[in-house]
Image (cartoon, rainbow, N blue to C red):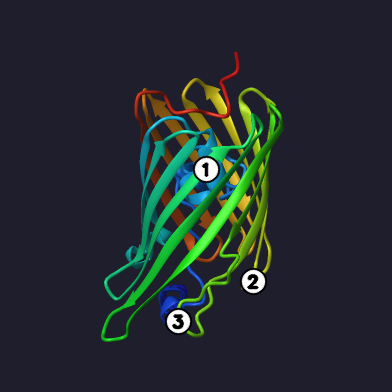
Amino acid sequence: MKRSILLAELIFFVLLLPLTSLSSEPEKFPGARAAGLGNSTIALTDSWSVFNNQAGLGWQRSYWAGVYHESRYFISELNSNSLGVCVPVKPGTFGAGLTHFGYSQFSQTRFSLSYGMMLSKTISAGIGLNYHMVQIANGYGSTSCITAEGGIIYKPLEKIAIGAHVFNPTNSRLGDDKNLSTTFGIGLTYQPVSNVLIVLQGDDNTLSDPIFRAGVEYLPVKNLSARIGVSSNPMMLSFGLGWIVKSISFDLAFSYHEVLGYTPYVSVSYTFGGKPKNQVKPEQ
């Protein structure tokens, strides 16, 4: 009985928190691949870079579309959904994204437009603009703002990529006293062998303590990936699977919080006129 009361109080707190403070949005890293790797995304060069580090768009040369769903702690009011597209042009790639979090009484929506391109054979850079809108029911109204973000990815060696990303460097605000965090992160990917990818990342922002993330992706056979990850503040463990069938990528992941429990993530994406690129390959 006491456990049930405690759980109810925790759920109430999680739901009430966004209503009492709009100072920051819940973390959103669309793409279940990222979720399975502890949300270490900055140095990845997959198509979900349209949301996570726009510099990754420079490595994308195919039309792409993806959808993503997250059910935080299996609470429907905390659901998050995203839709992203990539459109290659010369000399780079445009990306567009839409993310919606919340329910009828409280919701946060983000529209994003981004562009990334290769500066050389080993360096890519990207920028993005976001329109944020928060709506609260029962006459409380809505507020909105625009933020900027951008990043760079450098591959000094074939097996190593280093990424950096900044979000909201202009310190945009949702209303007079509703800050959005300014976040800076550095990430690294290392591929010790052809079928293993190690990802590391550190994030720091103006509203909370630094966060460390790490993950490993392993391809036991062709087109099948297994992932595990960890992130701090709060401590979260994650794991997931990825499966590629022709031009379609299916990704599923779960994370675990020691108090609030599990969160499932799922994403499906389609690469037009080609096969999704993978940074890791099965062992020969």
Residue 28, percent from left and from top: 48, 58
Q: CA distance from mark 2 to mark 1?
A: 26 Å
Q: CA distance from mark 1 to mark 3?
A: 30 Å
Tag nearer the camera, 1 or 3 = 1
Residue 264, percent from left and from top: 42, 51
Residue 128, percent from left and from top: 49, 54
Say which residue appears at 45% left-offset and 55% top-offset. 263
- Return the residue at label 1: 116
Above or below residue 61? Residue 81 is below
Which of marks 1 and 2 precedes in the sequence?
Answer: 1
Q: Amino acid at mark 1?
A: Gly
Say which residue appears at 65% left-offset and 59% top-offset. 184
Which numbered disc covers residue 206? 2
The quadrant of the image that shows the C terminus is: top right
Quarter occupied by residue 158: top right
- Dot 1 falls on a residue whose secondary structure is strand
Which numbered disc covers residue 175? 3
Above or below residue 255? Residue 142 is below
Q: Amino acid at mark 2?
A: Thr
